[in-house]
Image: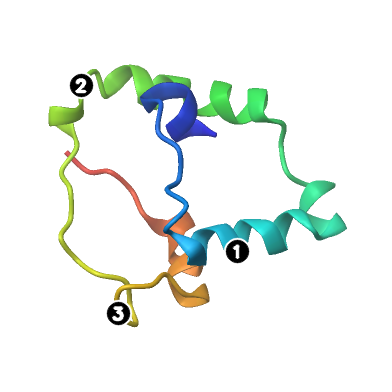
């Protein structure tokens, strides 16, 4: 939601691990009933998005996923812990 709103970025279809994770998450009532609305997510990240005024502020990693080239559940578990640090 945030990447699409503030960076016009869609998750590539080739990232099958992420798509599988999202498909499974959205199929669960526990997820859909507790997940904030897209608008709430956009508002929550609006301040961060404003501070990152251009893509030069973001440092890209060349690391692969934990188990190789495909994202696994272990990688997904790390996503909430990742931060962009200047």
Please name the residue shown 42% across and 58% down the image. Answer: 14
**Neighbours of disc 2 within 10 Å: few (<14), some (14-19), many (20+):** few
Q: Which mark is residue 68?
A: 3
How many angstroms separate mark 3 from mark 2 (CA)?
30 Å
Identify the image quadrant of the C terminus. Answer: top left
Outermost residue toward the bottom?
67
**Residue at mark 2:** 54
**Residue at mark 1:** 21
Please name the residue shown 34% across and 17% down the image. Answer: 50
Query: Mark 1 or 3 closer to N-term?
Result: 1
Q: Where is residue 39 in the image (x, y as percent from the top left)?
A: 65, 23
Label 1 vs label 2, nearer the camera: 1
Examine the rendered structure and indicate whether residue 14 appears above or below residue 35: below
Query: Mark 1 or 2 closer to N-term?
Result: 1
Report which quarter residue 67 is drawn in: bottom left
Q: In this view, does 61 lie to the left or right of 4?
A: left
Please name the residue shown 41% across and 20% down the image. Answer: 47
Report which quarter residue 53 is drawn in: top left
How many angstroms separate mark 1 from mark 3 (CA)?
17 Å
Please name the residue shown 60% across and 63% down the image. Answer: 21
Examine the rendered structure and indicate whether residue 36 appears above or below residue 27: above
Q: Is residue 2 left or right of residue 25?
A: left
């Amino acid at each position: 939601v945030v990447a699409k709103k503030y960076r016009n970025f869609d998750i590539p279809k080739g990232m099958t691990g992420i798509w599988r994770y999202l498909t499974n998450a959205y199929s669960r009532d526990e997820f859909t009933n507790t997940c904030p609305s897209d608008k709430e997510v956009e508002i929550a990240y609006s301040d961060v998005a404003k501070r990152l005024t251009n893509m030069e502020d973001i440092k890209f990693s060349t690391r692969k996923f934990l188990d190789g080239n495909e994202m696994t559940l272990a990688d997904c578990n790390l996503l909430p812990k990742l931060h962009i640090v200047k």
